[in-house]
Image: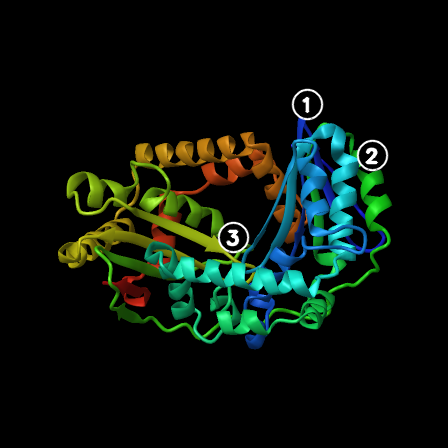
């Protein structure tokens, strides 16, 4: 993969890939998320993501929203446990307009009090809506269970009580401490040269003073497996099984990605889907997923089923895990699994918006972007013995936690 990269004098990194397309994608990814909040700040990173668009010293909220929409573009943002991102899709001729708008939002936001008041009610409504969706809520409560007492376990949205108390001074203090210039990446995929992209970023972001990070995130340790059952007024039982897993720098991370794909990834021929849905017909929604953070991670298996089938479903999952721990994947099995994963990665990079965000996140973590060929080689080098070893290390059922809504 050929891409352009550079660094501004204030520490902000740039990464761009040229594509011959009329539509371009650009974003700013900041290495700051909900795990960087103090307990009384829970929900702050997400609150800033909402309110940073509500006015600058140059524009009112309406003008921010209209700046790209008036020329057919669209802007969005998201918050995770470790990242905050602002990104946009637009016609490539509007690169200057987009990058100037990003700089205005990031550097000059004023967080007007009347807008903060309105947005608090929007976010509280979002929290309440989320609480009405057990298949989503269970993921947050599960991370609270396995990362108990650690900031990474707290949910991203925060609590209504905290959100109501946030002030403009709280916002500015959080930004000054956590929006560090050496922890920002401006990423782009579109029809513009790297030189031109660099020039625009320099023009609009060089005024942001250097603010390198001086703190380290506290690492999680002390995991204890737990089983928790919560009474919910739901038609189905919802269940999550899992525990801590490898961080983003662990050499076994790609092996776990492959194992997860075999076990219950996005394909219909995953082992859990074949066992629970196809052969036994006891679950419609089920998946396994692996999330890697900077210093830890988690692997989870989720399913929803009739309450009478809950114990049977758990037993079937345990049996599939035990098979992976005891039996090596055959040559044909592992070859198919690798081809499937490679195909999924290749298709994800066909989406230029996803590619832009992947570029940004990769530079944020590794300060580089590995090409697909390099990733393919790493996937193809994984052996059946490694898969079995990872299954025994990460999926030891006696060390997995279980959360049930029923």
Residue at horizontal 40 percent and vertical 68 percent from the top: 146
Residue 373 x %, y %: 56, 32
Residue 325 to residue 341: above or below? below
Residue 210 to residue 276: above or below? below
Tell me the distance, in whole angstroms, between the alpha carbons under discs 1 and 3: 35 Å
Residue at horizontal 69 percent and vertical 69 percent from the top: 168
Q: Which residue is mark 1?
A: 20
Query: Mark 2 or 1 closer to N-term?
Result: 1
Q: Which residue is mark 2?
A: 195
Quadrant placement of the C terminus:
bottom left
Tell me the distance, in whole angstroms, between the alpha carbons under discs 2 and 1: 16 Å
Residue at horizontal 77 percent and vertical 50 percent from the top: 59
Q: Secondary structure at mark 3?
A: loop
Determine crowd level at label 2: few under 14, some 14-19, many 20+ residues with C-alpha closer than 10 A: few
Residue 285 x %, y %: 28, 46
Quadrant placement of the N terminus:
top right
Q: Which residue is mark 3?
A: 251
Q: Secondary structure at mark 2?
A: helix
Closer to the observer: label 3 or label 2? Answer: 2
Q: In this view of the protein, can residue 84 be seen by the observer? A: yes
Camera-side residue: 56 or 380? Answer: 56
Image quarter for residue 68?
top right
């Amino acid at each position: 993969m050929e891409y352009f990269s550079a660094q501004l004098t204030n520490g902000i990194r740039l990464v761009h890939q040229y594509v011959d397309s009329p539509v371009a994608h650009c974003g700013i990814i900041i290495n700051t998320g909900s795990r960087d909040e103090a307990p009384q700040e829970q929900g702050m990173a997400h609150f800033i993501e909402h309110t940073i668009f509500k006015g600058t010293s140059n524009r009112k909220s309406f003008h921010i929203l209209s700046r790209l929409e008036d020329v057919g573009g669209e802007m969005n943002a998201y918050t995770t446990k470790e990242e905050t991102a602002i990104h946009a899709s637009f016609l490539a001729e509007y690169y200057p307009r987009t990058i100037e708008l990003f700089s205005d939002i990031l550097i000059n936001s004023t967080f007007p009090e009347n807008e903060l008041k309105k947005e608090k009610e929007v976010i509280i409504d979002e929290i309440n809506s989320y609480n009405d969706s057990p298949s989503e809520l269970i993921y947050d409560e599960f991370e609270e269970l396995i990362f108990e007492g650690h900031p990474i376990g707290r949910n991203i949205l925060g609590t209504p009580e905290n959100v109501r108390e946030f002030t403009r001074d709280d916002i500015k203090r959080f930004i000054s401490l956590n929006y560090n210039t050496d922890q920002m990446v401006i990423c782009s995929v579109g029809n513009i040269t790297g030189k031109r992209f660099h020039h625009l970023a320099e023009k609009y972001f060089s005024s942001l003073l250097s603010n390198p990070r001086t703190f380290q995130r506290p690492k999680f340790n002390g995991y204890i497996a737990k089983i928790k059952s919560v009474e919910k007024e739901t038609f189905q039982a919802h269940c999550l099984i899992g525990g801590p897993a490898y961080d983003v720098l662990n050499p076994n991370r790609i092996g776990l990605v492959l194992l997860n794909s075999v076990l219950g990834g996005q394909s219909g021929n995953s082992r859990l889907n074949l066992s629970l849905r196809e052969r036994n017909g006891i679950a419609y929604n089920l998946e396994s997923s692996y999330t890697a953070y900077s210093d830890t991670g988690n692997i989870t298996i989720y399913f929803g089923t009739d309450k009478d089938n809950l114990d049977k479903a758990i037993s079937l999952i345990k049996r599939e895990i035990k098979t992976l721990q005891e039996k090596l994947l055959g040559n044909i099995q592992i070859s198919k699994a690798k081809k499937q994963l490679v195909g999924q990665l290749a298709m994800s990079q066909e989406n230029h918006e996803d590619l832009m965000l992947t570029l940004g996140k990769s530079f944020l973590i590794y300060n580089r972007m590995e090409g697909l060929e390099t990733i393919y080689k790493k996937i193809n080098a994984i052996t059946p013995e490694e898969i079995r070893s990872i299954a025994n290390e990460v999926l030891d059922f006696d060390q997995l936690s279980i959360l049930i809504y029923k």
